[in-house]
Amino acid sequence: MAELPSGTVSMLFSDVEQSTRLLTRLGRAYEQALDSYRLAQRAAWAGFGGVEMGTEGDSFFVVFSTAEDAVGAAVQAQVALGGLEWPNDEQVRVRMGIHTGTPRVHGLDYVGLDVHRAARIAAAAHGGQVVVSDATAKLVAGRLPAGVSLRDLGTHRLKDLDALEHVYQLVIPGLPVDFPPLKSLGTSASLPVTTTPLLGRHTEMTDLVSLLADPQVRLVTLTGPGGSGKTRLSIAAARQVAEQFPDGVCFASLAAFTNPGLIWSTIGDVLGLPSDRRAPPAFFESVAPLSALFVLDNLEQMDGAAAAVDQLLHATTEIVVLATSRRPLNLAGEHQYAVLPLALPTEDTPEAAEASAAVRLFVDRARAVRPSFALTPSNAADVSEICRHLDGLPLAIELAAARTNVLGPRALLLRLEQALDLRGSDVDRPARHTSLRATIDWSYRLLNAQQRLLFRHLGVFASGADLEALAAVHADEAGRGTQLIDLVADLVDASLVTVTEDDDGEPRFAMLETVRSFAVEELAQAGELADVRRRHAAHYVQVAERLEARRVLTTPAQVQRGGRLFDVERNNFREALTWASAPGGDAGNSAGSNRNLGLALLSSVAWIWKHVDLDEIRHWLEACLKNPHGGQTAALGRCLADYAETLELQGELLDGRDAARRSVEILRRLGDSELPNALAALGDLEGALGDRIAGRRAMEDSVLRARELADSFFLGDVLARLALLDIDEENWEHALELLHEAVGVSRSYGSDYMAIRANHNIAFVLRKTGRAKEAHELMSAQLQQSLSLESTLNLALFAEDYSAVVAEAGFPRWTPVLLGAADAELEQRGVARDRWQEAPIADAHAAARPTMTPTEWTDAYQRGHSMTIREALESAIAATTAPDD
């Protein structure tokens, strides 16, 4: 590496946007693309004297002596990338961020807040975009490369940085100029992207912007019938006022939920809160400091929504809520805003039609399916009458306009009138809701028998479905295979179903919530609801089994794929569990068999749900476990073990032990293969409650059962857990024997994670038995492997262990840095420290504190606290494993 520039330097970070998806699409050709990308980048860095500090995967960190050099290199790199030909006609888009500051040179690296600021600026950019800080912009103003200019992007709040950052974009000739909003706090980045213009809502937008700007207004509720455009208007208004809220906009889509408690976990998902901070009171502690706009979409189906929103407003002072609902919340201080239908033409003349927002929407959507469509003197009256029949409801107009691909306005009007007469007499419904139902019903009646059957079956999916799920639930054998694709394509063409692509490029089909409600009603009227719900639940049991971590997810790539699948299908899991846990079950179905399906699903997904939302998985476990029907099955025993672990994580040890004992009893009687896991859970709880003898007995029984079953996964896990008991009792040799066996078993199974964890415990024992150098070597190697696997699991725990290792290996000044970073990680995730970590932390303090003054310790600790856990570990490894040490 060249000599590091010092003093004022400019730091450039870059990486490939959506590189994982690119890798999935390109396969082996990704290596060719990566090589071309790296060559182009490095040529640019070298041409401007850049010093490459590090390359991880597809990312670069490069330092330049001047801001002009950094900007020149970025421009050259982006121009070069834009001119390359990529495999399979793909496009590699690279985001870059530049900041100029005075970081400290530490060994062979830079440290300090300026480094973090440069990285955060890059992380906020989009592929193809170069964003620079205010400091950099001031230095290069008037000295930019030919044709290059600066675009002011305003001030932004970047993650983990307290001060606002004024940033600019480099506008490079011949390259894209317009990008979405920066991915920073205080922006509208969490709002759904809309693909159609908002028409005819100028007055509403003006009113809402004014309301949301009023410091006395904290709750605005958009009310109106389904299909009136409440959601679309709320998104547009939120985007317009986003910059008024320093901590940004949080959009929570709640259409699929009936339990108001899930409001918190949904918001927590958007905000990225740790799983144990997604329920009150921890949730309110996390959001109380925020000055943000919460958009809560579709609250009408939640009986307790008003109380939940009221609780949120009373627990915070700077959060403003923009809600959408078919009915007001009726809370003190609520500003109700009725979203009325679009303005209708007052006359049948072309001029009057063109002035009508309803007609403009119809024409816009008609052109989407029939580009030649135009409003003319000959069809203006018919189009106006169509919009009147639909009461100006946007959704109804969009559904009708979609039919212009085969029907002209006159033919469309004739059929629309017949359909409205057929179902327009529902006197117990609001008039506008009746009109919407009539429009959906009209589109439904235009389908043939096979299309209608598939339409009804699609209604059971809470978050859409892929082709495999449709085939599993769809009852009509004639509608499977190729014809199934044709049938669902017909529903997409009729604007009754939407289609998107998943990460693998496969289609996924869904319905608007109002359309889905209609489909479920039709499903019930046809007498098909019970059977279809059962097939839906049975299919998602199979999907859940693919997520079974104990048998499948052993590598980082598998964990990432499993996490994506869980996120996509979580609402369908909820739908199946709601049905399975219902007290009486659907007509014609046994409540016991329903419950067994629910337990089977939970036994496969509880492991990942516990990491996402501990309170919600507890809710579902209790909902299914309290059902007295269904008998004592293996799924029941497995769910009891998961329930026991959940209760232990929440500190309810006695109830957890009771659940674990029941689990062991059931699984032992059935001879189930997951008995070792239940015994290990029981052993943990017995030990946590102070009964070491009972804990060891259960854990040793777990090891014995795993050996009998020749189950490498469970054996590796329980051997390591049993070793912890020996470590606690200072039975060092036996602990080493168990841990070495656990490493061998885990490697034979192919689980890198479990082998790494066992080796870390070996390093602990080596250190405790006076073999500090061996412990340091082993721990350093394991940390390198953990970081190369991009594993975020247990990094804080590893940092705490390593803090004691480096202290006893002669590097005590890294101890407070590692402890500070570990504390910051635990605080950010809201995770309680494991009781086993008390010993290494105490050892770290005892070995390192006497070598430093209190001020030195505090400064080093704060430096670590400002670093990410990965940065702290990488820096510590580099500093403590240098060749000359």
Image (tube, rainbow, N blue to C red):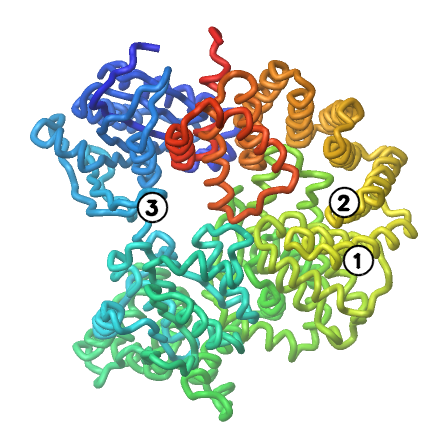
Q: Position of residue 797 (x, y in %)?
A: 58, 35
Q: Which residue is mark 2?
A: 687
Q: Secondary structure at mark 2?
A: helix
Earlier-in-chain disc, 1 versus 3:
3
Q: Looking at this rendering, what residue extends furthest in the left direction?
A: 142
Where disc 1 sits, the SS reads helix
Could you give the CA–CA distance between mark 2 and mark 1, rounded to whole angstroms? 14 Å
Position of residue 621 in the picture relative to residue 483 (left or right): right
| Labelled pair 2, 1 in contact (Cβ < 8 Å) | no
Q: Nearer the viewer, mark 1 or mark 3?
A: 1
- Spatial CA span between label 3 and label 2: 46 Å
| Left or right: 662 in relation to 310 | right
Q: Position of residue 664 (x, y in %)?
A: 85, 51
Residue type at mark 3 is Lys
Q: What residue did someone put label 3 on? A: 183
Cα–Cα span, label 1 and label 3: 47 Å
Above or below for 151 versus 382: above
The residue that disc 1 covers is 658
Asked if the residue at tag 3 contacts the one at tag 1, i.e. Cβ–Cβ closer than 8 Å, the answer is: no
Which callout, 2 or 1, points to the residue nearer the camera? 2
- Towards the viewer: 337 or 722: 722
Name above or below for residue 218 compared with residue 435: above
Q: Residues within 10 Å of mark 2 (few under 14, many from 20)?
A: some
Q: Residue at x 28, y 65 (%)?
A: 237
Amino acid under label 1? Asp
Residue 140 seen in this snapshot: yes
How far from the left and from the top, in percent, is residue 504?
53, 42
Name the residue rendered at 23%, 74% in the picture.
207
Q: Quadrant of residue 324?
A: bottom left
